């Protein structure tokens, strides 16, 4: 009987560890305590879950659900959403605790409407994420999605013979790269195309709550810096022009720091990783990404992955760097998903009949 009591007390004390994590920022402590080596296959695991969301498949065929995953990106289960957001949040926390008590995870953190919890919960209901429709627009499947125009001495298509959006983007990107004599590689360009899908769904009139507008969700002050007149802010060739300038500037700033940390990687792996971090710099800002490579306060993950790069894919390294720095420099789950989503869409694009034989997919 005495032994049973000891076992019971030990069990209760071990389970109370999870309750100690229930303060607003303690989900970040779960990340801080997660070893770097758990990032192996993290991208592939999380990518599977994000594909369920983006393409409304598997456990996300029913949109009114939340799915749980752990610090390895592994699927843990799901709940059906309740009648109200408050009751859904309560259900999420109940299941989080159950996953903890059944030893499916080492910690649990109750989430709120304003704070993430752990295990992480991802809402399947993201109606803006119609990736298949966006890819169709980019590829010009329907005639009404094809376009023509002129900008800064460039012409793409004609009124009688409009072109798919991807061709227009390719033309502008190539022209701007020739002017600056800055080479581009296939990985970089296909991630740029994927970014158009993620940013705006390839829609000219897209407008975010943060006042980012157009195809590449550029802020008015950025478009102004690109010397684009206000009446042309949504002009698709102008948007691509401005975004390419930003990419080229970020490229020049990122390349030396990246080379210093990851220059020893094999060429293909190096190019893929660089293009993912370059794309991430568009989302998070080049200063933050540079800090993740060079600032001693933030670059521990990068240095670890650089030293153990053989064990990880380029995608694992890119997501691992972001994951282990969430909660720093305003990096959060949205930053993590951005890297994963861009990689998913880039791969999807190169499987379409329209793009699979293009130079950036071969």
Image (cartoon, grey):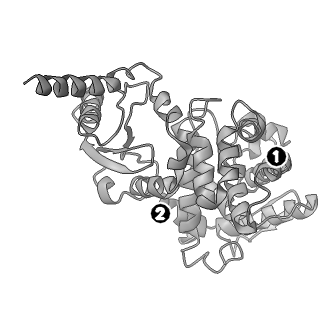
- Which image quadrant for residue 57? bottom left
Residue holding disc 2: 132
Whether residue 148 appears in this view of the structure is no
In x, y percent, where is residue 54? Answer: 44, 55
In x, y percent, where is residue 82? Answer: 22, 35
Q: Residue at x 68, y 61 (%)?
A: 272
Q: Which mark is residue 257?
A: 1
Q: Which mark is residue 290?
A: none
Q: Residue at x 53, y 70 (%)?
A: 142
Answer with left or right where residue 226 lies relative to residue 2. Answer: right
In x, y percent, where is residue 44? Answer: 49, 58
Q: Crowding near pointer 1: few (<14 within 10 Å), some, many (20+)? A: some
Q: Residue at x 55, y 79 (%)?
A: 353
Question: 354 or 287, which is in the foreground?
Answer: 287
In x, y percent, where is residue 241? Answer: 79, 53
Q: Quadrant of the C terminus?
A: bottom right
User: Mark 1: which secondary structure?
Assistant: helix
Q: How many numbered discs sit on the rendered protein?
A: 2
The Cα atoms of the two marked residues, 2 and 1, are separated by 36 Å
Mark with earlier residue (2, 1): 2
Q: Crowding near pointer 2: few (<14 within 10 Å), some, many (20+)? A: some
In this view, 341 is above or below 107: below
- Which image quadrant for residue 157? bottom right
User: Mark 2: which secondary structure?
Assistant: helix
Q: Quadrant of the N terminus?
A: top left
Answer with left or right where residue 39 lies relative to residue 213. Answer: left
Answer with left or right where residue 45 lies relative to residue 308. Answer: left
Whether residue 92 appears in this view of the structure is yes
């Amino acid at each position: 009987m005495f032994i049973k009591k000891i076992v019971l007390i030990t069990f209760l004390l071990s389970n109370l560890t999870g309750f100690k994590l229930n303060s607003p920022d303690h989900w970040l402590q779960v990340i801080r305590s997660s070893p770097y080596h758990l990032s192996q296959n993290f991208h592939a695991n999380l990518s599977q879950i994000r594909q369920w969301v983006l393409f409304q498949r598997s456990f996300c065929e029913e949109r009114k659900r939340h799915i749980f995953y752990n610090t390895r990106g592994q699927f843990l289960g799901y709940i059906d959403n309740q009648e109200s957001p408050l009751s859904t949040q309560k259900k999420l926390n109940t299941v989080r605790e159950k996953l903890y008590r059944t030893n499916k995870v080492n910690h649990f953190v109750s989430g709120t409407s304003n704070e993430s919890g752990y295990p992480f919960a991802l809402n399947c209901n993201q109606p803006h994420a119609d990736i298949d429709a966006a890819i169709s627009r980019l590829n010009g499947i329907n005639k009404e999605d094809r376009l023509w125009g002129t900008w800064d001495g460039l012409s793409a298509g004609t009124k009688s013979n409009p072109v798919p959006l991807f061709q227009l983007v390719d033309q502008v990107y190539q022209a701007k790269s020739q002017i600056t004599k800055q080479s581009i590689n296939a990985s970089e360009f296909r991630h740029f195309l994927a970014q158009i899908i993620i940013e705006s769904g390839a829609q000219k009139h897209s407008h975010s709550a943060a006042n980012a507008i157009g195809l590449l969700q550029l802020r008015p002050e950025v478009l102004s810096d690109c010397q684009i007149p206000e009446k042309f802010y949504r002009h698709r060739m102008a948007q691509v022009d401005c975004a390419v300038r930003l990419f080229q500037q970020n490229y020049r700033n990122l390349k030396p720091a990246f080379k210093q940390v990851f220059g020893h990687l094999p060429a293909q792996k190096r190019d893929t990783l660089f293009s993912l971090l370059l794309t991430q710099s568009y989302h998070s800002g080049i200063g933050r990404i540079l800090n993740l490579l060079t600032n001693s306060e933030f670059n521990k993950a990068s240095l670890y992955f650089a030293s153990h790069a053989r064990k990880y894919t380029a995608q694992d390294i890119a997501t691992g760097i972001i994951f282990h720095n969430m909660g720093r420099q305003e990096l959060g789950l949205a930053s993590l998903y951005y890297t994963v989503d861009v990689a998913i869409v880039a791969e999807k694009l190169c499987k379409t009949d329209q793009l699979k034989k293009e130079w950036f997919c071969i």
